[in-house]
Image (cartoon, helix red, strand yellow):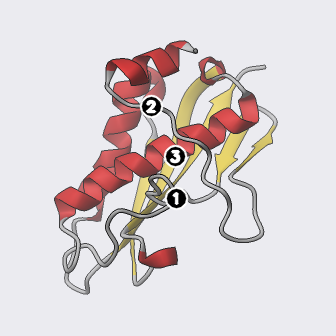
Amino acid sequence: MSAVEDRLAELGLTLPDVVPPLAAYQPAVRSGAYVYTAGQLPMVKGSIPVTGKVGAEVSPEQAKELAGVCALNALAAVKSVIGDLDKLVRVVKVVGFVASAPDFTGQPGVLNGASELLGEVLGEKGVHARSAVGVAVLPLDAPVEVEIVVEVQD
C-alpha cells in the first residue's frame, strides 16, 4: 500500500474500485504531468445512496458527505492511471456540480466535502483551486458530481 492509502486507512477509509463509466468515456486520462478525471458520482458499491436535489430531497449535510465520496472515487480513478497515489504531486483543480433546488445557494459548502477529504488525505498536496456550480440535474439523479485535475510525477 502507498502512504496515501495508509493515510486513508488511518481515517477509516478505503480506496474503492474505480466506478465503471456510464457512457463512452474513461474514468481518468493522463496528459503529460496531469491526470484529469471524468466527473465522479457518489457511487458506493454500484449505487448512489441518496438521490435528488440538494435543498429539497437531499440536505446540504448529506450532499457534503456525498461530495467526499465523489473525491474518494476520483482518487481511485487517478490511481487506475498512475498505479501508485504516492506519485501524486498535488491536486490542482476541483470542479463540483450540485443538483440544486431552485432556491439553494450553498454549493460551496457542499463541495467542501470533497475539498476537506482531499486535504485530510493529502495534506498540503490536497490544497487546490475549485469551482462549485449549481445545476438542474445530474446523471442518475445524483445530488453531486466531482472532477479533479492532479499533477503527477513519473
Relative to 19, 42 lies left or right: left
Q: Can residue 78 be seen in this view?
A: yes
Q: Residue at x 34, y 73 (%)?
A: 51
Where residue 49 sits in the image (x, y, percent)?
35, 62
Task: For mark 1, give the secondary structure.
Answer: loop
Task: For mark 3, give the secondary structure.
Answer: helix
Quadrant placement of the N terminus: top right
- Kindly identify which numbered label has been placed on residue 14: 2
Of the numbered discs 3 and 1, the one sitting upstream in the chain is 1
Type of amino acid under label 1: Gly
Q: Which residue is drawn at 41% across and 34% down?
A: 118
Where residue 4 sits in the image (x, y, percent)?
50, 19
Relative to 65, 89 lies left or right: right
Say above or below: 41 vs 9.
Answer: below
Q: Which residue is drawn at 61% across and 24% down?
A: 85
- Kindly identify which numbered label has been placed on residue 46: 1
Is the Cβ of the residue at disc 1 closer than 8 Å to that at disc 2? no
Which is closer to the viewer, label 3 or label 1? Answer: 1
- Kindly identify which numbered label has been placed on residue 73: 3
Type of amino acid under label 3: Asn
Q: Residue at x 34, y 55 (%)?
A: 66
- Kindly identify which numbered label has been placed on residue 154: none
- How far apart marks 1 and 2 lie (CA) works out to 15 Å
Quadrant placement of the C terminus: top right
Is the Cβ of the residue at disc 3 closer than 8 Å to that at disc 1? no
Of the numbered discs 1 and 2, the one sitting upstream in the chain is 2
